[in-house]
Structures are given as structure tokens and as C-alpha cells.
Amino acid sequence: MEFISSIFNYISGLGSYVMIPIMITIVGLVVRLKPIKALKAGITVGIGLIGLDIVLGLIWTNIGPVAELFVEKFNLNLTTIDTGWGAAAGLAFSTTIGSFIIPFIILVNILLLTFKLTRTVNIDIWNYWHYAFSGATVYMLTNNILYGFIAAAAHCTISLRIADMTAPIVQKSLGIPGISIPQGFAVSTVPIYSVLDRVYDTILPWTKDKQDKKIDSSKLSFISVIAEPIFLGLIIGILLGLSVGYAIGNSLQLGMSMAALMYLLPRVTKIIMEGLLPISEQTRTFMQKKYQGAEFYIGLDSAVLLGLPATVSVGLLLIPVSLFLAMIIPMNTTLPLGDLAATAFFISMATPMHKDNFIRTLISGTIMMAVVLLVASFFAPMITIFAQGGGMEIPAGAVQVTALSAGNLIALIIYQLSRLGFIGIALVIALVACILYITRQRKKETV
Amino acid sequence: MKTIIIACGAGVATSTVITSYVTQLLRDNNIEHRIIQCSLNEVRMHIDKGDLLVTSMPLKEKYDIPTVLGISFLTGVEVSKTMEDIVSYLGN
């Protein structure tokens, strides 16, 4: 045992560039990829992580100084850059918990299916990063790897149960049977949207059962031009530069840095994604053979919901809304950037739960973005440390990184409970047990 | 030469899965092609260049080119039907 742990410590000491390719290769072999394919998957993910590190370098060198000026000039504490969900996913996978997350979550899912505690077969491997993130933050806090894995399992279990409960709404909304959405962020929004929907019934009764199936999103086409990531980056960069008193030349340089960040982050994320692809295909085939039939739901990415008309238009409106909220919410430190290209994801569940009603979705989206900004700001120090894990030297300074998509309430609750150490982890387990018990009845009703 | 636009939420995750399938499919069928992978918001900008649009999600909005729902590449259910559709739209 000591021998194994000393090998493990040696490998993890080499940094995530080396550890992750080795781990992904092993995972590839476990899911029965050919050795050469497994190795290629591992190396590709490693290359993606190196790419991510290089691109994040733009933040430390070019964007950091502006954040400091922002504080000095306006007393606006926007010292954290939102790097977007791709970077957050890469960083979550690059942690110790993240490197084990794929086989671990599959195991948890199989156990829950076996004991009939869920009907969802989560084949959306990519989004396991949300669970890895919950695990990794708890591991960082408690320095206990077991607690980290319990946290990841807790987030996964809650997600699968919420996916089961929302499956009928999702299927009806899309007209596709047999699917559910266990995506780690989307599920965290479900309790809030559910409560808000009841509030709207009382205060906005005229919006009840008023479907807005045909929203003319072409009216919003002026936003959708700016919504192209490179323009968003350029415009925000230039405005930021001018507002802190940079000369025009320097502002243009900052604009270009931010445009580059917006363009390059998804590109490097795609490399990580491509590396994981053969593993995810193999897993899906295996899980689907094992769990066939009408009693199972196929767990998918919340991206499949983003074509709903209210989601498209509210998604666009949330871009200016998020920027505005970031400036006026007192405790917020996050400057929205990377995830401005993905605002629709934050309301993926709102539209089906509010029955395609535009006004309800817009109000819910605005409230959600405020919550997300605060939680993302809270997690910024942890994510910044994850970003340092690759071994890149980050200049000591005021600037931090986060991602709005890491502004996850379930992760926050698990993290806060874990502060209590052993008792906290016991409370996390008790919380999951309670959720499973309470939702047991409701599950029967909807079946 | 056919141009296929493949779109998902952010043009990164699910569209990468679909792209890998479609690329293989078109290679197998000897259809000369190029693929534009993008986010749903960007479809409008590429649509005039495209011969076919494949998306990860059902769309309410209609475009001027044939559109195929690619969700079966994610679920693994009825993949062959989707593949037939794609080939039939592109084949002459």
C-alpha cells in the first residue's frame, strides 16, 4: 500500500500535464480501448490542458493589470475573470479527483441503478466535470481524498435524482422519449426555478399557461452579432481599457487580448473534448448494452434543450443583464466574459419548467445570473489554485479566475457543509439520503 | 463539395461528438465535404454557405437549408436513421 501511494505521490508531483495523460490512458484501457488509442486519448487531453494553460496566460499578463486599475479608479472590485465553462471543465478534470472521476462516477451510477435509486444512465461523460469540481474543492478544503470522492458522489446522486424528476418535463418539451438531463449545473437550478414558478403563479397570474412558442428572435439580431465571442471580447476589452483611462492604443491591445481569449478558450477546450471522445463512446456503448429498456432514461447534456425559442432570446438578453448585474451586486468580484458565449445554458431548465413563457424565463434567468455571479466569485480562489496546478507560474497579483458555470449551488452547499470536517461529510451523506427519501413519493406519482 | 454546419450550445461539446460521426459517415460514403462547427448563435452567419444543418437540439426556428436533428448521435438510439437522412440530403 505504501509502495502504491509513493508511486501515486511521485506521479501527482509531476503536475497535471503528466498525471492526467497517465490517468486518462489507464481509464481508456479500463474501458477496453486499444492501448494505442488509450495512449492517444491521454496525450490529447494533456495537450488540451497545456493549451489551456497557455491561453490563460493572457489573463495573467494582459488583463491582470486592468483589474487592479478598476479597483483603484472605481472601487469596483471586479478582480476575477470569468474564463467560461470550457476552462472550468479542463481545470476540474486536471485535479486529483478529476483524474479519477470518469470510472468513479460510472461506478456510482451503476450502484444507484442496481439499487433502483435512479432511472438515469448518465452517458454525458464530459459533464462529469461538475461532479469533479465539487469533489476537488472539498478535497482542497479538507485535504482528505475520501471526503472529496464522497462530495463528488453526492453531487452525482442528487443530479441523477433531479434528472429522474424532471425527465417528463424535458421529454414533453423536446418531444423525445426516454431522455433526462443530469448535467451538474442544470440540475442545481431546478429547485430555484421550481419555487419561482410557484411565486409567479401568485404574483404574475396572467403569465400562467401562456406559452410563447413563437418568439421572434430576429428582433434581437443586433445582440446576436455582438454575441459572437470575438466581438464580445473585443468590445468588452476596449471599453474596459478606456474606462480605466488607458490610451486608445492600449485599449485596442486589451480588446485584442480579450478577443483572443474568447476565441482560443473554446478551441483548446475542444482538444480536451476530442481526447475524451473515444472513452465516452466506449462507455456509452457499454452502459447502453447493460441498461436497455423503457425503465431507463438516457442522461444527456443540457445543450439539447437550447433550441427552445424562449431560451434562445432570453439567452441573448442575459449577456447585457449579466454585465449589468456584475457591476451593481456588492459582493460580486467576477467580470463575466467566457460564459457570456454560453448564457443560454443557465436557463436551459427554466424554459421547460416555465412552460415556454418568456417573461418568467427572463426573470428567473436574471435571478439565476445574480446567484451564479456570487457563487462563482466565492469559488474564484479555489479555481485559481487549480489553474496553478499545471505548473505555470502565475504572477502574484490581484487577478483571479473563475467560471460562471462553476457558480453551482449544489457544489456550494456541499462545500460549506464540508467545512465542519467529519461531521460535515456525515451531514452531506444525510442530506443526500433525505433528498432520496423525500423525492421517493413524487417519483412514483410521475411514473 | 458539400458544406455541413454542425451546431450545439457553444460549438464545443456535443457538436464535437456529432462532428466525429458525420466526418466518418461522409468519408465512408465518399462525399467530399467541409464542416463548420459552431454555436447556435452563430448559425445565422454561416447558413448561406451551408448545404445541410445538423444540430444537437430540436429547433423551432426554420432555416432555408435542410436540417437534421443529430441527437441520436448522443443517445445512440436510431443512429442509422439519422445517418440515412444526412446521406440522402447530400447525395445526388
Image (cartoon, rainbow, N blue to C red):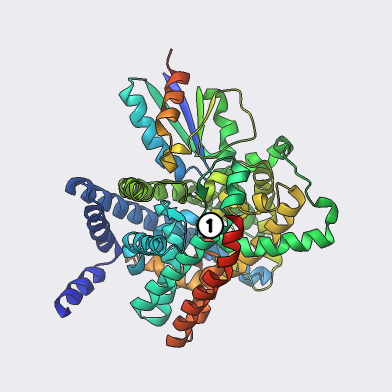
Q: Chain of mark 1?
A: A
Q: In the rendered view of the protein, which quadrant contains the N terminus of chain A?
A: bottom left
Left or right? Give the position of B62 relative to A411. Answer: right
Could you tell me which secondary element the residue under label 1 belongs to? helix
- Residue placed most toward the observer, A412 or A44: A412
Q: Position of residue B22 (x, y in %)?
A: 39, 31
Q: Position of residue A103 (x, y in %)?
A: 31, 60
Residue depicted at 21% across the width and 68% down the height: A11
Left or right? Give the position of A232 relative to A384. Answer: right
Q: Position of residue B56 (x, y in %)?
A: 50, 39
Residue position marked by numbered label 1 in the rendering? A163
Residue depicted at 61% across the width and 59% down the height: A445
Q: In the displayed structure, would residue A75 be above or below residue A62?
A: below
Name which quarter of the figure residue A240 lies in.
bottom right
Name which quarter of the figure residue A23 lies in.
bottom left
Q: In the rendered view of the protein, which quadrant contains the C terminus of chain A?
A: bottom right
Left or right? Give the position of A447 relative to A266. Answer: right
Residue A344 seen from this side: no
Q: In the displayed structure, would residue B20 be above or below residue A351?
A: above
Q: Amino acid at mark 1?
A: Ala
- Residue placed most toward the observer, A262 or A256: A262
- Residue placed most toward the observer, A210 or A184: A210
- Residue placed most toward the observer, B5 or A197: A197
Q: Residue furthest left?
A: A3
Residue B30 seen from this side: yes
Q: In the displayed structure, would residue A241 be above or below residue A34?
A: below
Residue depicted at 24% across the width and 67% down the height: A14
**Within 10 Å of the Cα at label 1, are there few (<14), some (14-19), or many (20+) other Cα atoms?**
many
